[in-house]
Structures are given as structure tokens and as C-alpha cells.
Amino acid sequence: MADNIIPSFKAADLVIQLTSTPKIKPEVSTFGTIFTDHMLTIEWSAAEGWRAPLIKPFGNISLHPACSSLHYGVQLFEGLKAYRGDDNRLRLFRPMLNMKRMSKSAKRACLPAFDQSELLECIRRLVEIDQDWVPHSDSAGLYIRPTFISTEPSLGVKKPGHALLYVILCQAGAYFNNEAEALSLWADPKYTRAWIGGTGDCKIGGNYGCSLLAQYEAVDYGCQQVLWLYGDDHQITEAGTMNIFLHWVNEDGEEELATPPLDGIILPGVTRQSILELTRTWGEFKVTERYLTMSQLCSALRQQRVREMFGSGTACMICPIGHIVYQGKTPGTPAGRSHSAWRRR
Amino acid sequence: MADNIIPSFKAADLVIQLTSTPKIKPEVSTFGTIFTDHMLTIEWSAAEGWRAPLIKPFGNISLHPACSSLHYGVQLFEGLKAYRGDDNRLRLFRPMLNMKRMSKSAKRACLPAFDQSELLECIRRLVEIDQDWVPHSDSAGLYIRPTFISTEPSLGVKKPGHALLYVILCQAGAYFNNEAEALSLWADPKYTRAWIGGTGDCKIGGNYGCSLLAQYEAVDYGCQQVLWLYGDDHQITEAGTMNIFLHWVNEDGEEELATPPLDGIILPGVTRQSILELTRTWGEFKVTERYLTMSQLCSALRQQRVREMFGSGTACMICPIGHIVYQGKTPGTPAGRSHSAWRRR
């Protein structure tokens, strides 16, 4: 790289073009369907490095039809939220964890590096400009979606020479249609979400698109989402697009909160990490990152050792799991089927 | 689906808008960088079904920044070629195999179904309009890239309600920089291209983007591409973005042309299928779809039983493999290292 190429964009160079036609803010609807007035875009090219960040009115992006984000999935994203406190001040929830994970995904996707703090400052400015969109609520937040795509306009499968980093903001709303109820999961080894040597530990587009067919097959089995399994021993890995937690009495009779370890196929969720850190400070029960197999889970369900299962994620937060269909059967349901315990905490 | 929704677009409804400023055709350069004057676009929505196909001047596409092709890799593509015969007539190489595979990929990606023959007829019309771009050559062709992306403008991970099928045409050129030479491959289990229960048998974007990092790590090992391995026994699966063939004297002393079977992790290549069909009609040697491990290959290389290895694909056609780096070593080179035998056939 030539000396004159900027290694990262700078928030200090931010150019701001405000909209002259702000939208009327509708009632909060389904997750991720209503977007705010502005977006952040930052262009990169191998020849010229990063250009100045730009905040401009929300609108479509114009892409060369050959660009490798559309052909080879050279793309990644992040998800975080801005909340309005009782003091009316806005706060982002642990945003540097997202910036760090985004950098990791960029490395995996062969997209260029950037300064994490500079991006965060640009996002902070964007949220500030669209601050009226952050709900006046102690539970709802504004969803922030950083996105990073290749704009390389040619068809060879190669490291992109052009890229676009952009950030859009949207109403969070309810992630699942029937949010009041516990989620049902279809556990089947037919589809695999991620595998060792793949991209399951990064927030890369391909991980999600390839999950859709399984999600709809789950519906055929009367379930809402997939419980993703791995390996011949049917390890439990994730649920839908969430990390998964099991609050149970384990094989050794200990009360335990368990979630699969970050071994390369699990997304290192920010909510996951926060739950682990918080519950470890409580000291109320054992908190473990460990492998969990369907055989272990089925035994525990039959023996009524499962207090609760839940999924965690930025979009859904804490999502209780009601029942599981595995090998055509429902091996039992968690004892705390009202499921509100974890969500209330 | 309502009765009035068209199950597929029809070529008879094609609308054609010709460019008023045709491009000057440059010298053929790198693969997939120079595009022709026109493109085909066909829009779909769950509410209204397929719209009429449109051939229009080549240009950028305008996408909602939330669309799930850019976030979740809900996208797929195909690749085929048009050739000009000695008789000056244009021919597509086995295009219905591509249409069939595209339908299969669409099903896997939860994109809508279409009539394969209608799409082929639309492509035929597009090639006809840009026919001057097909090289006057007995070996070079015009590369055709059908692409199918979600244009769903919302962030929930779900089946798209909007999609765009488009087709662009480009100069094929040389796929690898040093086409005259044999390719070197880095064989390492660190990265996995595809896995059972994934999308490796479909032409879906995520399969390709996640291969880039491995490709550049191969360069660090002095190689040009990756030899993708699978499983604890290091099965040989694909090479770069190509199917792989081994022409050898097998463990039983038989002359054999072998390629891995279509077990769910191998892309069912059109060139692969054509090679198998052709060589089976020759009857010169055994032709087998079978598992091949690195251990078997290393033994064969050491014992000089390997006549040739090559990759196959529409873009690269037949690409001879020179040497392999595996566990830090080069286990030997195929006997026919001049590598022209298969390419000449």
C-alpha cells in the first residue's frame, strides 16, 4: 500500500447532508422494516484507500451488476441498539464489541481494515442526527445495522478492490410475530448452519441466507425456528439466528447455565457475552461454556432437570424456548414454561 | 398464491430497449471485467409474481440498502458460454444444464421458481442482440452470467418477498493470470469449502466469498489456489472454484479418470458432467466418481502413478494442476507435467 493511502477513514472528515424532507415516524411495526431519515456511507478502493465518511438522506444504493457482494456473498453486517435512558440520554449497548467483531468479519471476508473507534464515532453522529427515532421506552431501542459489502465490479473470485461500508438505522419492533409466546424449535441434522473451517463465527451474509430453507422446513414440522445441530453426536449449537442457553440441573446434579463454547462454529454474540458476564458476577449457579448434545438435553427434559432454555441476540434479546421437535418427537418441555423468568431479569 | 399470479415470466412478453450508445469493444482482457451493451432484468414480488422480462442498456442496479441479498447472501448465479462456430453461427454450451442447476439453487436459497425454457429463450435473445461481442475464435466464448438476488427491503431473516433475476454478458478472457502454466494448489484442512447440510452443491454466493481468505493464504504458501479437503481423512473435494479430476493408475493398477461424487458438497459442474460423459464414451480407461483422499493421492504421486490432475469449470475450462503443497511438503508432481494433454483433447 502506498504511503499516501489513509489506513482508515476519520470521523473528523465526516460530511453531513441533511434531508430536506424528514419522514413522518409511523407506529413501530415488524423488526427492520422502517428506516430513519439518514444513513452513513464510506467508500473504499485499493487504489485510493478510504474516502471521507458521508451522512446523507436514506436512499437506495447504486451497484454495478457484477459486484462481488451480489455474486460471491462478499459482505458482512453487525447489529446493535441505541437506547434512551430515564434521563433522556441516548446510549449504545457495548458498541465496541460490535466494532471489534465487525473488524474480525472484515478480515475473514477479505474486506479492508478500518479504525474501530472512528467508525463508532461516525455511528454516534448518525444516531445523534436521527435521535428522534430512538423510542421513549425503557425496553425498546433503535436498531443500528452497520453493513460492509464488496463493490468490486468484476466476476473473478478475488479480493475486492472496491468496497462500501454503510450504516442504516431502523425501528426494532418485535422480532418474532408471537413474541409473547415461547419459541418452538425443530432439531434435525439435515441442515448444518456452520462448520469448522467455515465462517460461522463471523457475521457474514452466507451464514444466514443458507438457513432460510431449514427455517421453512421447521414450519412444516410445526416449529418456528431451527435448533442447529453439529456432528455425529448432534451437538446443540444455535437456535435460528440466536445463541442458545440451557438453564438446568446438569448430569452432576449442579444448577448450571450452559451455552456452547466459541470453537469456531458459534457466533460470539454480544448478548451471549453479557449474559455470561452478568450471571458469573451473580454467583447463583455454575455458568459454563460447554458442549451440549441432544442426548444430554433429551435426558434432562425427560427427567425434568431443565428449568429454562432461551435464545439470545441483539434483535430478539432474550427469547424463551417452549418445545423442541427431535427425531419426530417432543422429548419434553422446560419446567419454567411460562418463560418469563429470564426475560424479566 | 392467487390464481392471477403468473407462475413464470414468459419470453414472449420480453420488452427490448436498445442502447443508443453502443460501446467500443476493447481487446479481451482479464476474465469478467468488460461487459456488453445490454442486460436482461426480470423482477418478481410475492404479491404480484413475475413482471415482464426486460432487455435494456447495461448499467448499475438500484437496491434498497436493507435488501437481503446484501445482508444475508440471498443470491445465486450461473455461468455458461456462447461460442461462435466455424459456420459463424452462435451456440450456447448445454445451457439447459445451467437452467436446471439455477432452479435447484433458487429452491435452496428460497428464491422463487421460474420456467427454465422461458429464461433460456430470454438469454438467447440477449445474446442475439449483443452477438457482435461473441469472439471470432474456435476456443474463446462470450461468458453469460445469470444472477438471481433477493431485493427484500427489510432486515428480518426470512423468505424474500421481492427478487430480481438478471443476466449480464462479458468477455471471458483468461481466468488465471499465467494460463500457460500449471496451477499450484495448497491442500490444508484449515478451511472447509462446503459441508453436508450446507450449500456446496448449489451455485450460491456464500460458497465463494468464504473461500477468498483461504485463497490468499494459499499464496503465502507459494500456491495459486486451494485444494479443498473434507473430513478427518482429508478427502479431496474441489480446487479453487473448479471441480477436480485425477487421471492416474489407481490402487488396483487400473488406468482411471476419477472425480469426487456428487454427495452434497461438490458443485455439479457442467464441464465436469461433460468430461465424464465424453470419456465414458471413449472407453479408453475406467471413469469413476469416487472418494479420493490425500493419503491415496500422496502415495500415487510418490509412486509416479499420477498421469495428470486438472480442474474443470466453465470459466477456466480445463486447468492443469502442477504441484500440491500438503502438510508443508510437495508430495510429488503428476507425470504429465507439461499438462497439455487434457487441454488439447
Image (cartoon, coloured by chain):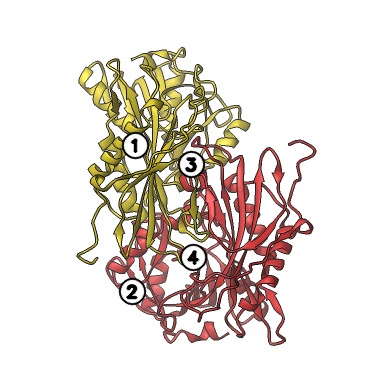
Chain colours: A yellow, B red
Q: Kindly identify the amino acid type of the residue bearing the numbered disc 4.
A: Leu
Residue annotated with mark 4: A155
Chain containing mark 4: A
Q: Is residue A80 above or below residue A255?
A: below
Q: Which is in the foreground here, disc 1 or disc 2?
A: 1
Under tag 4, what secondary structure?
Answer: loop
Residue A210 seen from this side: no
Q: Which is in the foreground here, disc 3 or disc 4?
A: 3
Asked whether the residues under the numbered discs 4 and 2 touch, taking CB atoms below 8 Å apart as contact, a structural biologist would say no
Chain containing mark 2: B
Q: Position of residue A22 (x, y in %)?
A: 46, 32
Q: Which is in the foreground here, disc 1 or disc 4?
A: 1
The reply to the same-chain question for discs 3 and 4 is no
Residue annotated with mark 3: B66
Q: Which is in the foreground here, disc 2 or disc 3?
A: 3
Q: Label 1: how many residues lie within 10 Å, few (<14), some (14-19) or many (20+)?
A: many
Residue annotated with mark 1: A126
Residue at point 46%, 14% (across, down)? A337
Distance between the Cα atoms at labels 1 and 3? 17 Å
Q: Is residue A215 above or below residue B190?
A: above
User: Counting residues from the N terminus, which is met first, the one under dot 2 or under dot 3?
Assistant: 3
The image quarter containing residue A92 is top left
The reply to the same-chain question for discs 1 and 4 is yes
Under tag 1, what secondary structure?
Answer: helix
Under tag 3, what secondary structure?
Answer: loop
**A266 relative position to B53: left or right:** left
Q: Label 3: how many residues lie within 10 Å, few (<14), some (14-19) or many (20+)?
A: many
Find residue B331 and name its label. 2
Residue at point 74%, 50% (across, down)? B8
